[in-house]
Image (spheres, rainbow, N blue to C red):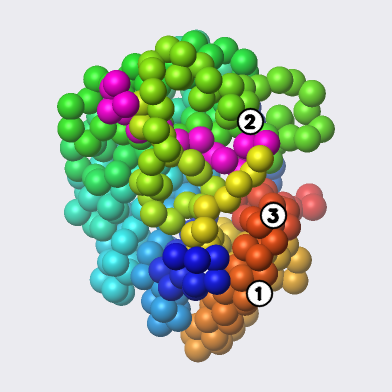
Amino acid sequence: MTCLEERTDYIMIFSIPECNLSCSYCRLNNVKRNEPLSNNEIVELGEACYKAGIRRIRWTGGEPTARKGFANLVSGMKEIGIEEQYLSTNGTLLYRIASALSDAGIKRVNISLDTFDRGNFRQITGKDLLTEVLQSIRRSTEVFGLVKINSVLVGEDVESVYDFIDFVSGFDENRPVPRFIPLGACGGPGGPEDSRRVLEPEQILNEFSRRYGDLELCEDVENNNPFTRYYTIKPRGVVFGIAHYFFTDRKGSLRQPTTLRINPNGYVSNEFYSHDVPFLPDFDFQGKVDIIRQLIEDKKTHNREWHLKSMERPPKYDLDFWRFGRVSEI
């Protein structure tokens, strides 16, 4: 695929505001938020997405599994005709409903885990639930397809990164894939204004090569994420990824980004804009369909322009808004 070839497999990200953790790098803990969409409203938006040509959905948060009736939401999207559904989760509740979500339509999962140290986990998340997360990872490998472990790098301790490789090496089938994300990627502490040092991607690669042997760049295991580079540790057969947005050379994939996003209140964006975005509840059904179609067309245009500029970083958008909705002024 060349940089001018257009992707047609667009994916809509639905953000669910509920969460059962208080992670230290999440900036909106204890902030009052506006009323989110109901389950029925979300399903209606799913129908509009389907009519606009979207066949894939990713559920993110917050924490989707903390929402009452989440499995019904997933099955409702499957009944509409959505072909693939993915879940990003903190994993603290997933082990309880993994089978139900698999039956409902979830194909693969991203589970967030930043440390294997119980005390550090409690300090980062505010809860002592590491055992539950590990249980969810093991259960996920039994009922889902691709299982990724997303880890935010919160310091310079490379030993903690080794823990992820050692952990996934213990799986014989459907081995989870760790994906490492520099702290600044979260948009909170660790951003450009944060002077704290964190592990750099090149440093991780050097340390892994020294400890484990040959590394080999491999195909994108997701097939839709142009912002991650995946490598195989050849002596172990373990695959891991690093968010290459944060490599110093920033060489990009030729695949185009295909995500659009609906925030918890019903605002929709193709992720190239952060202001004057449409509020879908204000429109009738056909109006919703037309807006989503237009956003897809606009994204195709921006993709072409963006790739012709050698994969420059796209315009920054308000991550808080797209994860949690508009913050109340009260």
Q: Nearer the viewer, residue 6 or 23?
A: 6
Disc 1 residue type? Pro
Q: Is residue 42 left or right of residue 312?
A: left
Question: What mark, if any, has residue 312 been given in the picture?
Answer: 3
* Disc 3 crowd, CA 10 A, few/some/many (<14, 14-19, 20+): few
Looking at the rendered structure, the secondary structure element under dot 2 is: helix
Which residues fall within the magenta stretch? Answer: 234-248
- In-front residue for pair 161/52: 161
Read off the residue under disc 1: 278
Residue 316 visible (yes or no) = yes
**Element class at badge 1:** loop
Residue name at image x 32 percent, y 26 percent: 234
Above or below for 213 versus 106: above
Q: Which residue is at a point 62% across and 18% down the rendered structure image? A: 155
Q: Nearer the viewer, mark 2 or mark 3?
A: 3
Please give the residue where the numbered disc 2 appears in the rendered image: 183
Where residue 85 appears, as percent x and y from the top left, is 34, 58
Residue 222 horizontal/vertical position (percent): 38, 50
The tag earlier along the polypeptide, 1 or 2, is 2
Picture coordinates of residue 287, whole percent (x, y): 55, 87
Label 1 Cα neighbours within 10 Å, binned few <14 / some 14-19 / many ≥20:
some
Q: Is residue 121 visible?
A: no
Q: Kindly identify the residue that appears in the image at 73 percent across and 57 percent down.
A: 315
Query: What is the distance, in whole Å, between disc 1 and disc 2 at their CAs?
Result: 30 Å
Query: CA gap, disc 2 to disc 3?
Result: 20 Å
